[in-house]
Image (cartoon, grey):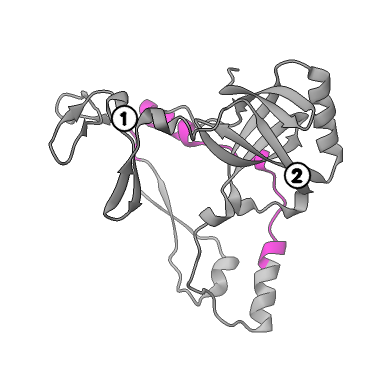
């Protein structure tokens, strides 16, 4: 595996060299747009909306930051480097209970694997496994400081990236209606009656289904759920599949 970047977990006088590695990958099927006439590739065209000048490389363009709907500021690339964070340190901030993690903030994950000093890395990994706490930290990738959690899973150290709390979309509308006790109990019993499951048991079958399309010209079966009225709670207990070709 190839590291995205090499860095150091740093706290006080403690420094643990690690590499940041991709934790998950997609199905491996890349997509692009194709011309319906000649089947040629259709690329992205970068051009100025004001003067129609076309650019062939991103380095030829300046980066603009929008301050509002009709306001923006353009900063020279050299001056921007002054505010970019260096990518050589994961700064340990504090500990927090594993149970206090707000899962709505998690937006990415990486492996933190040792470059050297494997014993120190192993000590931290075992400590994270035994502890009920996780480590809150900040780190930088591509010049932007991110918030993260260092934890342990399957005998390796994992870095979970978090959105900052102020980045969460605030819902001003209130949803839901008043329910009777029987209706509340029904909602609970629906959840409790579900079978136990594991993430490992659920597989991404898109690539497998895609390959079947290539191997066969038979019509594809599409399963459509039966439509129900919003106030009809029988959908909790009924499973109806309608196949159409």
Residue 36 drawn at (x, y percent): 18, 31
Whether residue 83 appears in magenta in the rendering, the answer is no
Whether residue 204 appears in magenta in the rendering, the answer is yes
Residue drawn at (47%, 36%), measured in percent from left and top?
206
Front-most of residues 187 and 84:
84
**22 is higher (above) or lower (below) than 234:** above
Report how far apart the C-alphas of labels 1 and 2 lie in the structure: 44 Å
Secondary structure found at label 1: loop
- Per the image, the residue denoted by label 1 is 32
Dot 2 alpha-carbon crowd within 10 angstroms: few under 14, some 14 to 19, many 20 or more: few
Residue drawn at (16%, 24%), measured in percent from left and top?
38
- The quadrant in which residue 113 appears is top right
Disc marking residue 94: 2
Give the magenta range. Answer: 190-219
Front-most of residues 197 and 10:
10
Residue 75 drawn at (x, y percent): 35, 37
Horizontally, is 243 left or right of 202 in the view? left
- The quadrant in which residue 4 appears is top right
Q: Is residue 209 visible?
A: yes
Horizontally, is 105 left or right of 149 in the view? left
């Amino acid at each position: 595996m190839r590291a995205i970047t090499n860095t150091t977990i740093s706290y006080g006088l403690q420094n643990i060299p690690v590499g940041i590695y991709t934790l998950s990958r997609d199905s491996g099927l890349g997509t692009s747009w194709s011309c319906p006439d000649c089947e040629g590739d259709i690329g992205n065209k970068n051009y100025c909306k004001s003067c129609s000048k076309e650019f062939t490389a991103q380095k030829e363009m300046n980066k603009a930051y929008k301050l509002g709907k009709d306001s923006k500021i353009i900063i020279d690339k050299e001056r921007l480097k002054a505010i970019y964070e260096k990518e050589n340190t994961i700064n340990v901030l504090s500990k927090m209970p594993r149970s206090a993690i707000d899962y709505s903030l998690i937006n990415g994950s990486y492996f933190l694997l040792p470059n050297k000093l494997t014993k120190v890395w192993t000590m931290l990994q075992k400590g994270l496994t035994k502890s009920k706490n996780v480590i809150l930290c900040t780190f930088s990738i591509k010049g932007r400081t991110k918030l993260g959690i260092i934890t342990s899973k399957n005998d390796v150290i994992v870095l979970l990236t978090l959105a900052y709390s102020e980045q969460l979309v605030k819902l001003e509308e209130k949803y839901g209606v008043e329910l009777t006790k029987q209706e509340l109990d029904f909602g609970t019993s629906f959840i409790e009656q579900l079978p136990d499951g594991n993430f490992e048991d659920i597989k991404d079958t898109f690539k497998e289904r895609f390959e079947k399309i290539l191997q066969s010209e038979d019509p594809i079966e599409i399963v459509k759920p039966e439509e129900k009225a919003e106030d009809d709670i029988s959908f909790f207990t009924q499973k109806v599949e309608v196949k159409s070709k």
